[in-house]
Image (cartoon, rainbow, N blue to C red):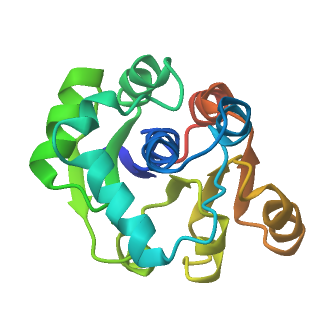
């Protein structure tokens, strides 16, 4: 029987931040140079969490979700390969509707077994499998100690990640999806 790995959607598989930033920049009056500086970073110029949530909603709604790119173009190939060894559950608390997510998966050839849509990030701790892949390193505080959290490096988590990997034994830092693939294929978790 295959073990299950769980994977976050936004900014782990789907590059939501890139499209959200483009939508924000479209609404802001910035120079082309300023726009280029912040295009792939998480700088939100003092927007509230409610305003950010609205931009995330815009990114997933009105067919904008077709513009959301993959974090890495090799993800479909990697997930297909991982599927030979593991069941794959996508755990997400995104604002997107399941129908939109599934259409995006189909468009991007994402291999998975289950999609579990949660209300909050904290709920991931209840559903997480032996291995979870995410961009949110702070999940380590709520994860079971028997689970391994693989954190995909992002500009917003790198400082915190360095601190957490020295404190917790069940968090692993990975720079990219190639490292994740190598780790999970060469050393399948049983």
Residue 164, placed above or below residue 82: below
Horizontal and vertical percent for residue 6?
A: 41, 53
Q: Left or right? Give the position of 17 relative to 180.
A: left
Q: From the viewer's perspective, is residue 106 above or below residue 19? A: above
| Image quadrant in which you'd find residue 122 | bottom left
Determine which quarter of the picture holds residue 42.
Answer: bottom right
The quadrant of the image that shows the N terminus is: top left
Q: Quadrant of residue 135?
A: bottom right
Q: Nearer the viewer, residue 126 or 18?
A: 18
Which residue is found at the position 22% from the left and 52% from the top? 115
Residue 18 is left or right of residue 4, and the answer is right
What is the x, y in percent for residue 52?
A: 44, 66
Using the rendered image of the protein, determine whether residue 137 is visible from the camera's viewpoint: yes
Name the side, left or right, on which 81 lies relative to 31: left
Q: Nearer the viewer, residue 39 or 139?
A: 39
Residue 130 picture location, percent across and down: 49, 60
């Amino acid at each position: 029987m295959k073990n299950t790995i769980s994977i976050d959607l936004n900014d782990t598989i789907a590059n939501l931040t890139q499209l959200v930033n483009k939508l924000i920049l479209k609404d802001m009056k910035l120079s082309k140079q300023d726009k280029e500086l912040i295009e792939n970073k998480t700088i939100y110029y003092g927007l509230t969490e409610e305003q950010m949530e609205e931009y995330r909603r815009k990114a997933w709604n009105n067919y904008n979700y077709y513009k959301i790119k993959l974090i890495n173009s090799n993800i479909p190939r990697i997930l297909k390969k991982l599927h030979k060894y593991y069941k794959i559950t996508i755990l997400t608390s995104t604002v997107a509707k399941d129908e939109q997510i599934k259409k995006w998966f189909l468009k991007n050839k994402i291999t998975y077994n289950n999609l579990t849509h949660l209300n909050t990030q904290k709920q991931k701790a209840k559903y997480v499998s032996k291995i979870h892949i995410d961009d949110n390193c702070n999940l380590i505080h709520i994860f079971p100690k028997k689970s391994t959290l693989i954190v995909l490096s992002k500009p917003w988590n790198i400082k915190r990640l360095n601190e957490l990997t020295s404190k917790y034994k069940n968090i692993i830092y990975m720079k990219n999806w190639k490292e994740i693939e190598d780790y999970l294929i060469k050393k399948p978790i049983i």
